[in-house]
Amino acid sequence: MAAETASDDNNNNNNIENGGNCGERRPIMGESPSKQQSLRQDFEHAAAETYLITRLAFILLSYLGVGYRWITRVLALLCYAVLLMPGFLQVGYYYFFSSQVHRSVIYGEQPRNRLDLYLPQNTKGRKPVVIFVTGGAWIIGYKAWGSFLGKQFIERDIIVACLDYRNFPQGTISDMIKDVSQGISFVCNNIASCGGDPDRIYLVGQSAGAHISACAILQQSIRESQGESSSWSMSQIKAYFALSGGYNMLNLVDHFHNRGLYRSIFLSIMEGEKSLVKFSPELLVQDKSVVKAVSILPPVILFHGTKDHSIPSDASESFADALRKVGAHAEVILFEGKTHTDLFVQDPLRGGKDELFEHMVSIIHAGDEDALAKDAMAPPMKRLVPEILLKIAREISPF
């Protein structure tokens, strides 16, 4: 693993800390001195990650064994991806060829310690920043999953950093939380060089990413409440948006098992049954010893679809209740009839006005009259996938 890290670092010079201003389009933010060199580095990095992910996939198969549930879900996932391929290809082209996307910026020493940075064309003034932590059942998360969300936000003059982190079996939940916290710290301390406002940062987590990022900010709040020194401050995070997340792992073990994420694997991810409370934000905030830490948390806005079968919407409602009971600001916004993938995949690919996205933007731009006026005049998003394919994909989605 150390050899992989060293090789990756040598092949990737996309480090924010090398100096310069992102808005000036200098090579240090993901654009190497020549296009040929950039393509070579992208190819080498992609090859290294493909090898790593392939090797980890075989390790994961040894955990899974041969089971009916996971085999059928993998097949469903493949069919789901094929149906949505018209949209995925368009987003993929944007991801790999847009000059506004700086891929695989290094934020740490681990192979998956990379982030993708999305920069608006308008470089004037300090801009709000979104840090996005993708989902993927703690197993298949990848920073590129946030590419469409990144594209949406930069069209509204909001900088986006999509974090990658170690997945299982490359790492367990402690590693994932550590990576996300390190990524948040990196953005907080370096985003000013890209025109971002380090005091207007918004954290967005989706599915497993919502759980991981909730753990990360809670752990950071506990450290601050105990007077420990840190490289970033919770005061920099203006709000936490959580999409379709789960926050009480004790309540979700059996549910995940029935959905195909077997108990043995889930407990391995969570570092054993005794650690479920430790990694359950809903249970942690009820501990009287962390009352001071909870008071440091930013406003928490939880989004969930009422037809979410992967993680029931009750998970968000219960977490919000627990937060409110201890004095934290928490809000739940439910989307009637929406599934686990509707909010993050099908709805954006459908085009038009995206209610979830517009709600987040309205909070990020609150108090900025000029930005709000531009938002009101923004054209609807382009449809990327025919409606018939979206409906079929929704029915066979394994999530």
Image (spheres, rainbow, N blue to C red):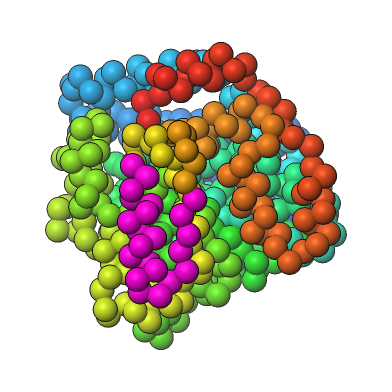
Residue placed furthest toward the bottom? 227
Q: Is residue 57 left or right of residue 335?
A: left
Quarter of the rendering occupied by the N terminus: top left
Residue drawn at x 42%, y 19% is: 395
Q: Nearer the viewer, residue 357 or 266?
A: 357
With respect to residue 175, does 237 lie above or below? below
Quarter of the rendering occupied by the C terminus: top left
With respect to residue 92, does 82 lie above or below? above
Q: Residue 331, percent across and down?
A: 48, 60
Q: Residue 296, percent across and down?
A: 46, 76
Q: Residue 192, percent across and down?
A: 70, 66
Q: Is residue 53 left or right of residue 173?
A: right
With respect to residue 286, does 8 lie above or below? above
Q: How many marks?
A: 0
Which quarter of the picture shows residue 264? Answer: top left
Residue placed furthest toward the front? 336
> In the rendered structure, does residue 41 fall within the stretch colored magenta?
no
Residue drawn at x 22%, y 50% is: 251
Q: Nearer the viewer, residue 336 or 110?
A: 336
Q: Is residue 257 left or right of residue 7?
A: left
Residue drawn at x 79%, y 57% is: 371
Which quarter of the picture shows residue 383? Answer: top right
Residue drawn at x 58%, y 60% is: 202
Q: Nearer the viewer, residue 249 or 304?
A: 304
Q: Residue 16, percent across and down?
A: 65, 58
Residue 59 seen anywhere in this rendered image of the structure: no
- Start and end of the magenta stretch? 312-333
Q: Nearer the viewer, residue 108 or 234?
A: 234
Residue 198 seen anywhere in this rendered image of the structure: yes
